Structure formats: structure tokens, C-alpha cells
Image: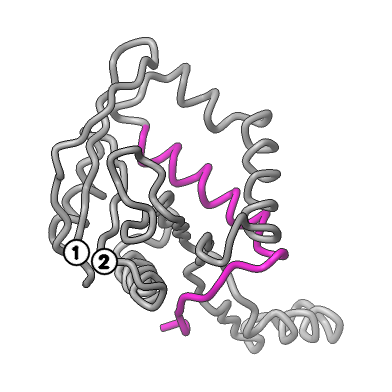
Amino acid sequence: MADVGVRAARHDDVAAVTSTQIRAWKYGYRDFLPEGPLEQMTGPAAEEMWRRQWDEAIITPPSSRHRVLVAVEQVVLDTDAFPALGPGGIEAAAAMRGAERVVGLASHAPAEDPDLDPTTTAEMLTFLVDPDHVRRGHGSRLLNATVDYLRDDGYHTIVTWVFADNHGPLGFLESAGWGEDGAERVLNMGRPVRMVRLATDIS
């Protein structure tokens, strides 16, 4: 099995973070979001916008409490399996061995909802795993790292907004001790799309 872990995102992760978000949204939201709005969220123009936003979030966050974390796997290559590549190809493959692949991401910040205290409550803004790398523990590692950082920052509670029909993340977070706190919002995406707010106590 490839080495795995979670670390703070770096500038050279921006493209991979953007790609992971787009892939996760296209796969995870296709069954309950209208096709038009989903295409607007994941099309080429939107992808460029997200790339700029991730670049800013990673390189110049508003505060030390705004973070982007990435789940990574080590790229494992068996150079003995590529004899036809020749010496140059073998060297290139060997150089790639040990490189990291971004397979998930999570971001958090002080909570901004008006009913919450941003000094004690944080919001997990993003929590996504690449659809080709689910069920490998990356979600749990991202969640645990998020809790560790926020507990060190002195937070007592974390909230996050989830689409009410996005049953995979809902079930995962509920199994990890999160629960709906009663807040909800309805987005107009050609038809009403409901979101619910989950919360967990980390004090």
C-alpha cells in the first residue's frame, strides 16, 4: 500500500486541489444537483475561478486560523516493469517514485454564520476526497487533522454545511459524531436545494 498522510497545502498543490474539487463535485453531486448549475460549478470558466481562489487561500490566507489541508498518497512505481522505456525513461520513472499525489482536501476557518461565535466555533468549509480514492481512510485522516488543528487553536465546536441529499458525506460525518444543529438554508438552483448544518463538540 502507498504511504499516505495529511499535510498543509502548498503552492504547488493548487492545480491538484482544484482538480480534486472539480472531480469530487462532478461525481458526488450528479445525482441530486440540477445538471445546469452543476456544469456552471465545474466547467472550464469555473475551474479557472476556483484555481485563483485556492491559490489565494493557500498562499495568502486571511489569518493563521484559515487553513487548507491535503490528503496525499505516495506515487509508487515499479521501475523494473518498464524495460522498454530505455535508460532515460527508467531514470524519469525512478525520479517520480516517492512523489506525492493529492487525493483529498479540507479547509477550515473561523465560523461566519451570525448565530455563531467565531472565537469558539470554526467552520469546515471544504471536505472532499477524489472519487478514485474513496474508502481508503483519507476522509478520516482529513477529519482528524482538522480537529487537531482547531483544538490547538482553542476552538470548542466545528460546524459544516452539507447538501441534505448528499447522503455519503452526511452518513460519514454522523458516524464520526457530528449531528444536525437545526440550521438550514435553501439554495435556488433552478429548483430548491436544501443544505443542513452539522456540528460537533471538540472541547
Q: Amino acid at mark 2?
A: His
Q: Residue at x 47, y 75 (%)?
A: 6
Q: Provide the residue designation for mark 1.
A: 201
Disc 2 to disc 1, how far (Cα)? 6 Å
Q: Residues within 10 Å of mark 2 (few under 14, many from 20)?
A: some
**Foreground residue, 190 or 108?**
108
Disc marking residue 181? none
Percent across and percent down for residue 16 are: 62, 57
Whether tag 2 and tag 1 are in contact, CB under 8 A, the answer is yes
Closer to the camera: disc 2 or disc 1? 2
Q: Residue at x 45, y 80 (%)?
A: 4
Residue 163 found in image quarter: top left
What segment carries the magenta color? Answer: 1-29
Disc marking residue 156? 2
Q: Residue at x 13, y 61 (%)?
A: 175
**Do we see residue 153 in this rendering?**
yes
Q: Amino acid at mark 1?
A: Asp
Query: Is 113 placed above or below 40 here?
Result: below
